[in-house]
Amino acid sequence: MATATPLLTVEEFRARYASEKPYYEYWFGEAVQKSVSNWLHGILQLLLGEMLRGSGYKSGTEVELRVVDDWQPKPDVIGVTHVDEPYPTKPPDVVIEVLSPDDKMRDVFRKCRQYVRIGVPAIFVLDPESKDAWVWSRHTDNLERINTLDLPNGRTISTHLIWEEMDRRK
């Protein structure tokens, strides 16, 4: 009979995986490797950060959230009105996940549900390959296709403009 792998404490996780690349996230006592980014993923992360800044947010990529002890993800892009240094200890206003070719949708759904649990008001998922965008709906507990990112501060970002600028930067 196989023995279960012992769970990591947050301290053990940080000691083993803090400087590892590709990045790892702390999920309920386990180190979960993030998908490896490709060129389109990187372009889109940078672009989304710029667009969030232009919409009144401070933005960052791959910033570890330390809102709760049992789950500490590194979202692709976050937008906040106030920066907690060195790590956010309050939910960001906006979280955007950019899909990589090897992402599994069940993991994306699981991650979105955890963002809801920790209190993130706006959760978006964008796919640079298919040029599709979704928002997480708390009402349907599902992703819903969108044409604009409706931000908590009342501003919007058109997905048409996102894809157009991404193509220009390729």
Image (tube, helix red, strand yellow):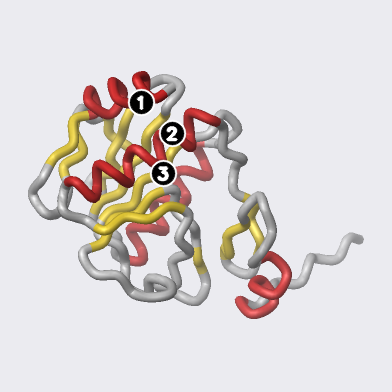
Say which label, 1 or 2, has the lower sequence index: 2
Circle 3 SS class:
strand
Q: Which of marks 2 and 3 is nearer the N terminus?
A: 2
How far is disc 1 from disc 2 in space, using C-alphas? 7 Å
The label on residue 43 is: 2
Taking depth in this image into account, of 158 and 122 the one nearest to the observer is: 158
Numbered badge on residue 166: 1
Badge 1 vs badge 2, beta-carbon distance below 8 Å: yes
Q: Nearer the viewer, mark 1 or mark 3?
A: 1
In which quadrant is the C terminus drawn? top left
Disc 2/disc 3 C-alpha distance (Å): 13 Å
Tell me the crowding category of disc 3: few under 14, some 14 to 19, or many 20 or more residues within 10 angstroms, Cα based. Answer: many
Q: Quadrant of the N terminus?
A: bottom right
Check whether the beta carbons of the residues at disc 2 and disc 3 lie within 8 A of each other.
no
Furthest-front residue in this view: 169
Q: Is mark 1 on a helix, strand or loop?
A: helix
Residue at the location (70% across, 72% down)?
7
The residue type indicated by label 2 comes to: Ile
The residue beneath circle 3 is: 97
The crowding category of the residue bearing disc 1, from other C-alpha atoms within 10 Å (few below 14, some 14 to 19, many at least 20), is many
Secondary structure at badge 2 equals helix
Q: Which residue is drawn at 41% across and 20% down?
A: 130
The percent position of residue 124, horizontal first and vertical second, equals 32, 43
